């Protein structure tokens, strides 16, 4: 049977992992709440005040802890966090929101008590929890497998087991001494802890976000980031940075990465290693320090930095001064981490025996290896010649949510499968934001559907448009559109429909289609400027398909300009009218289109799927 100290280690790691997951779900749920309250005006002021008040109270909960019942606080905190984590898996927005609020409160109370009593164990458990969170996301192709409805039976077993472990761990007095009340962390340490949690949940902890941000491939970034996270646990931070840098350059060169990509990725990985390695020194107790107030201050900093980063994505509708300021928010967090704190010096966890050292290295190698396997791309798209009509779809996926803010990426994948589309244009695509569970929508959908994907970043490199293709993409590029309000982009993929074997089809007879996907702005003047950029980007390309959410009806100048550019609407070919696409529930207007030039339209359909806040449009064309 495990000793109480081992049970406490397992308990600490699990609760801190649950806390990290709860924070991600909380911000994802708040995204829908704020949207409904501010933009859609469908959430009442009283409900908004209740939710915001509950969130603030959850972050401040450690301030109300009784001072001399710390063992009981650890026990109750672990049990409450386990129960909240179980209900967090339920597929209902309101239940998930309040479960995340409860988990933030319970996990925060547990974390601050652990930090006060056993700071070294807190730092070690947090580092392991960060690695575990990465592994769960990589296992689900960026979508944490433990946050899906199918995980509920597993989570039930884990939550009950953790509750039992917590009871056994605290059933008798601990053998380790409790620090004197006069010891604790400094205010600056609290600030750096909050900044560290922000960076982990906005960029450094999401390998897909780091891949999009640096331009490197996800399959390269994911295992190297895992290595950067687990190296400090081995007491190897001193030489681990050099090893990571060499590995990045070597593997990147072998996999044909550009030098500029590696020049950005290498320092980011070293930063991750250094920041994780600094946890032990940041959280070390010192004379005259406190714990509760600095910890809560750090959590408030974490909250404020996330709000500031959210403004960088929603500047047209909130604070225009935050346009393109996401990098500055990240730099501010990094600056906080670099500020020296009193008594701070290099530190690392101690591995007591050679057996423990070998076990730790084996576990770390296994974590990196498994991450590398999960991150590998799936099988290549089909290379056989296309048969039958070419099916092209467009889908505004609403960042993976449906109209009621239920996270429905799997349902969206099923809708695309049902459409039978060969090429899909996607809009409102996130690539690693905390407000959408940190998921890379294009990568996840591409792997889920066995399709290639091309992402066109528009906002802060982590939100934009994308193309999925069932057939090989031979070239791709993307470009920003002139945008006074929300920044938009156009993404291009050249798709080869004929076999790749030059002996089967001569190069001059290859069936090639240029696919262009975009999202146009909400105001007429904005759309007019952006459409000029779109048509200039496309040029005279033919055969070509253009699709997206144009935010314009068929009687608009935008539609007329596209027709003047010789783009045909398949609705004309089948003599259909109406067929509104937005909103998904009881649609009233047609603003989502698939148009073509140099291709003969055959048919068009609007699927009645309700997995997004728009309906999916699929058109058929005779192939070139």
Image (tube, helix red, strand yellow):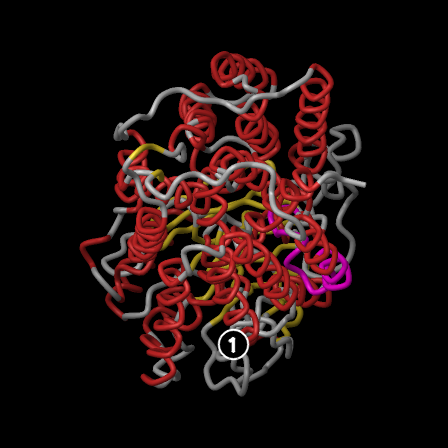
Q: Position of residue 97 (x, y in %)?
A: 50, 70
Query: Which residue is depicted at the point 67% across and 24% down?
Result: 360
Judge whether 56 appears above or below 341 on screen.
below
Residue 512 found in image quarter: top right
Looking at the rendered structure, the secondary structure element under dot 1 is: loop
Depth check: give the residue in front, 559 or 341: 341
Query: Which residue is depicted at the point 79% across and 42% down?
Result: 384
Q: Position of residue 140 (x, y in %)?
A: 67, 48
> Can residue 472 be seen?
yes
Q: Which residues are magenta?
A: 141-158
Depth check: give the residue in front, 452 or 238: 238
Q: Main secondary structure of the magenta part?
A: helix
Residue 611 found in image quarter: bottom right
User: Circle 1 is placed at which residue position?
Assistant: 403
Query: Which residue is depicted at the point 40% across and 32% down?
Result: 284
Q: Quadrant of the N terminus?
A: top right
Query: Which residue is depicted at the point 67% across and 48% down?
Result: 169
Q: Position of residue 13 (x, y in %)?
A: 60, 43
> Can residue 567 be seen?
no
Depth check: give the residue in front, 375 or 293: 293
Judge whether 159 appears above or below 132 on screen.
below
Q: Is residue 145 magenta?
A: yes
């Amino acid at each position: 049977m495990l000793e109480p100290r081992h049970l406490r280690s397992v308990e600490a790691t699990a609760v801190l992992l649950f806390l990290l997951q709860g924070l991600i779900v909380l911000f994802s749920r708040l995204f829908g709440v704020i949207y409904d309250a501010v933009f859609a005006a469908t959430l009442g002021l009283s409900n908004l005040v209740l939710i915001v008040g509950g969130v603030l109270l959850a972050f401040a909960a450690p301030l109300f802890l009784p001072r001399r019942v710390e063992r009981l606080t650890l026990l109750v905190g672990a049990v409450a966090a386990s129960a909240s984590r179980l209900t967090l898996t339920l597929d209902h927005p309101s239940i998930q929101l309040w479960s995340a609020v409860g988990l933030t409160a319970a996990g925060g109370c547990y974390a601050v008590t652990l930090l006060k009593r056993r700071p070294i164990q807190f730092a070690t458990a947090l580092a392991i929890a960060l690695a575990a969170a990465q592994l769960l996301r990589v296992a689900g192709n960026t979508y944490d497998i433990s946050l899906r409805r199918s995980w509920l039976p597993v989570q039930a077993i884990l939550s009950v087991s953790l509750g039992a472990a917590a009871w056994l761990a605290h059933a008798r007095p601990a053998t380790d001494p409790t620090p004197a009340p006069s010891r604790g962390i400094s205010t600056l340490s609290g600030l750096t802890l909050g900044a560290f949690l922000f960076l982990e949940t906005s960029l450094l902890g999401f390998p897909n976000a780091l891949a999009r941000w640096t331009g490197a491939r996800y399959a390269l970034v994911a295992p190297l980031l895992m290595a950067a996270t687990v190296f400090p646990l081995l007491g190897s931070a001193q030489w681990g940075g050099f090893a990571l840098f060499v590995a990045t350059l070597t593997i990147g060169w072998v996999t044909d990465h550009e030098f500029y990509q590696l020049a950005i990725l290498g320092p980011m990985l070293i930063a991750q290693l250094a920041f994780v390695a600094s946890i032990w020194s940041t959280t070390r107790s010192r004379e005259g320090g406190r714990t509760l107030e600095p910890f809560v201050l750090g959590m408030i900093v974490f909250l404020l930095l996330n709000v500031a980063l959210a403004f960088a994505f929603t500047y047209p509708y909130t604070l225009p001064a935050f346009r393109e300021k996401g990098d500055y928010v990240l730099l501010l967090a990094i600056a906080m981490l670099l500020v020296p704190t009193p008594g701070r010096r290099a530190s690392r966890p101690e591995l007591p025996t050679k057996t423990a050292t070998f076990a730790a290295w084996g576990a770390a190698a296994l974590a990196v290896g498994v991450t590398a396997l999960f991150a590998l791309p799936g099988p290549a798209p089909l290379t056989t010649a296309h048969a039958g009509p070419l099916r092209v779809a467009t889908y505004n996926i609403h960042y993976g949510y449906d109209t009621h803010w239920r996270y429905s990426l799997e349902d969206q994948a099923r809708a695309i499968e049902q459409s039978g589309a060969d090429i899909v244009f996607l809009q409102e695509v996130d690539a690693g934001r905390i407000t959408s569970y940190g998921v890379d929508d294009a990568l996840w959908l591409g792997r889920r559907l066995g399709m290639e994907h091309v992402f066109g970043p528009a906002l802060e490199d982590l939100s934009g448009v994308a193309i999925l293709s069932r057939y090989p993409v031979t070239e791709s590029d993307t470009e920003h559109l002139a945008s006074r309000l929300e920044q938009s982009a156009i993404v291009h993929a050249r798709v080869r429909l004929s076999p790749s074997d030059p002996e089967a089809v001569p190069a001059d007879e290859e069936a090639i289609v240029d696919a262009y996907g975009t999202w146009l702005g909400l105001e007429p003047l904005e759309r007019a400027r952006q459409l000029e950029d779109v048509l200039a980007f496309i040029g005279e390309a033919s055969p070509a398909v253009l699709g997206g959410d144009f935010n314009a009806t068929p009687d608009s100048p935008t539609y007329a300009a596209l027709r003047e550019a010789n783009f045909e609407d398949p609705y004309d070919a089948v003599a259909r009218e109406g067929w509104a696409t937005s909103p998904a529930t009881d649609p009233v207007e047609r603003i989502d289109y698939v148009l073509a030039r140099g291709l003969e339209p055959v048919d068009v359909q609007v699927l009645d799927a309700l997995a997004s806040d728009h309906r999916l449009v699929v058109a058929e064309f005779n192939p070139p």
